[in-house]
Amino acid sequence: MSSTGTFHLVVASVGETRFDGAALSATIPTTSGVITILPHHEALVATLQKGTITIRETLETKTVDIEGGVIEVANDRAVVLL
């Protein structure tokens, strides 16, 4: 997906997928501070804190309120498990 300037983002909890698709960016509250994931982001794993994930798509912006979780980023793909 990186050729289009996007990366694949999945935001899911047990039994529910809140987002699964291409994103231009995702701003996420981690326990170390707020980070923004962009295409070609360096691999990382981080724990999340209560807050709001802001997902920028090509035509709109979506938000997802979270209570916590983890994120793993690798190979132009980010997976958030809540």
Image (cartoon, rainbow, N blue to C red):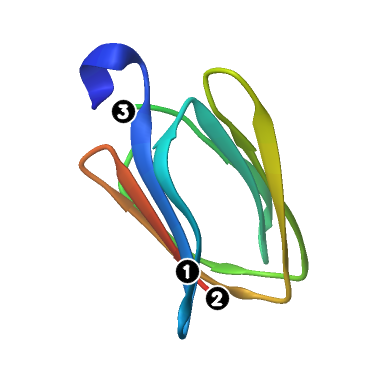
Which mark is on residue 12? 1
Q: Secondary structure at mark 1?
A: strand
Report the side of 34 relative to 81 (left or right). right
Say whether disc 1 or disc 2 marks the residue closer to the N-terminus: 1
Report the side of 50 relative to 25 (left or right). right
Q: Nearer the viewer, mark 2 or mark 3?
A: 2
Q: Secondary structure at mark 2?
A: loop
Q: Percent x, y for residue 32?
A: 66, 60
Q: Percent x, y for residue 34?
A: 70, 48
Contact, mark 1 vs mark 2 (Cβ under 8 Å): yes
Which mark is on residue 40? 3
Q: Amino acid at mark 1?
A: Ala
User: What is the C-alpha distance between the residues marked 2 and 3?
Assistant: 23 Å
Q: Nearer the viewer, mark 1 or mark 3?
A: 1
Q: Nearer the viewer, mark 1 or mark 2?
A: 1
> Hey, which residue is sitting farthest bottom in the picture?
14
Q: Amino acid at mark 3?
A: His
Vertical comparison of 32 with 50: above or below: above
**Residue drawn 30% across the image and 14% down it:** 4
What residue is pinned by disc 2?
Answer: 82
Vertical comparison of 64 with 17: above or below: above
Asked whether the viewer can see residue 78, the reply is yes
Disc 3 residue crowd, few under 14, some 14–19, many 20+, Cα 10 Å: some
Asked whether the viewer can see residue 41, the reply is no
Say whether disc 1 or disc 3 marks the residue closer to the N-terminus: 1
**Residue drawn 57% across the image and 39% down it:** 26
Q: Amino acid at mark 2?
A: Leu
Contact, mark 1 vs mark 3 (Cβ under 8 Å): no
Q: Secondary structure at mark 3?
A: loop
User: What is the C-alpha distance between the residues marked 1 and 2?
Assistant: 6 Å
Report the side of 58 relative to 52 (left or right). left
Disc 2 residue crowd, few under 14, some 14–19, many 20+, Cα 10 Å: some
